[in-house]
Amino acid sequence: MKISIIVPCFNEEEALPLFYDEATKVLSKMKCEYELLFVNDGSKDRTLKLLRVLSKKDTHVQYLSFSRNFGKEAAMYAGFCNASGDYVAVMDCDLQDPPALLPEMVKILREGKYDSVATRRENRDGEPPIRSWFARRFYAIINRISDAEIKDGARDFRMMKRPMVDAIIEMTEYNRFSKGIFGWVGFETYWLPYKNTERVAGKTKWNFWGLFKYAIDGVINFSQSPLNIASWFGVLMTFFAFCALIFIVVRYLIAGDAVAGWASTVCIIVFIGGLILFCLGIIGQYVAKIYLEVKNRPHYIVSETNLRKPKLMK
């Protein structure tokens, strides 16, 4: 049995040595073959230099370095495409995903009932309250409107058997939302809860607006509900406009006053115009996604690696 640990890295020079020491300590006691597959996502610090040093010191360390920053989703996909293990795990480099959970995850998979062991946070200690509130609302909404099941507090940290990894690789869309993909491909998943931990070093790369954009991408990638909402808005407003037209005609025939009510008319026009622009914005988001897909550009480009037969583009 071989275990592959995929570790996306973006400016993680402070956390990288700490993660390597902790992960190596745990994996070396598991009495199995393993590889640490680091994906350098266009870091501007010394992350790549550290990976070169670690790979020369330890043959278990493999790395891919992108030509620029392609994003965490591309980094995870590159890891899946190049991982050679029977069991494949995704972990963050900041030790918010505890390596100490790896033996338990392997034990659960070996029992044969589950194809994947996914982690979720029991609490959100240390996270701003407003971010926690929006995160919970996001999980509630996306589970209601999409086919992908995503647990509240779900992390990207999970371990999967090879058949599930192969299924994920076959999903080649450019606009990726891995939390949704993990749920969409199916397979039996065991949810392993753990207490939230702080970063050991460095700064988080996520801010509120970055997470908000990520949430919007998740909704658009895995649900047609926004388009359906826009359509129903159109039907509803058409009905109201028809009723308003009848009211105006009847009032004119009875009262003969064509001037009174101009303020309310302007308000209605502005309101309907706003709804039209809102619906066009929703449609525009889907069109933009289609535009990116039909370009068929690679998800990532590798500029340097120590793998023997890497998939440099995908």
Image (tube, helix red, strand yellow):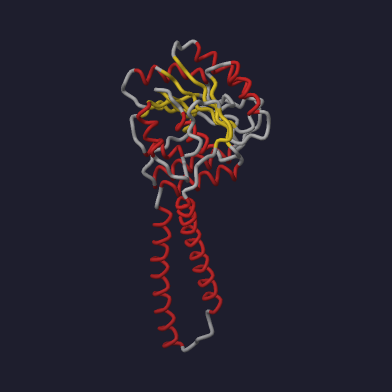
Q: Position of residue 55 (x, y in %)?
A: 58, 20
Q: Position of residue 151 (x, y in %)?
A: 43, 35
Q: Residue at x 48, y 43 (%)?
A: 138
Residue 168 visible, this orientation: yes
Q: Position of residue 216 (x, y in %)?
A: 50, 48
Q: Residue at x 61, y 33 (%)?
A: 10
Pick out the residue farthest to the right.
Answer: 45
* Residue 175, placed above or below residue 159: below
Front in this rendered view, residue 75 or 247: 75
* Residue 147, placed above or below residue 94: below
**Quarter of the rendering occupied by the N terminus:** top left
Quadrant of residue 198 in the image?
top right
Q: How many marks?
A: 0
Quadrant of residue 2 in the image?
top left
Pick out the residue farthest to the front.
Answer: 308
Q: Residue at x 53, y 42 (%)?
A: 134
* Residue 180, placed above or below residue 220: above
* Residue 279, placed above or below residue 84: below
Residue 190 visible, this orientation: no
Q: Position of residue 104 (x, y in %)?
A: 43, 17
Pick out the residue farthest to the left.
Answer: 113
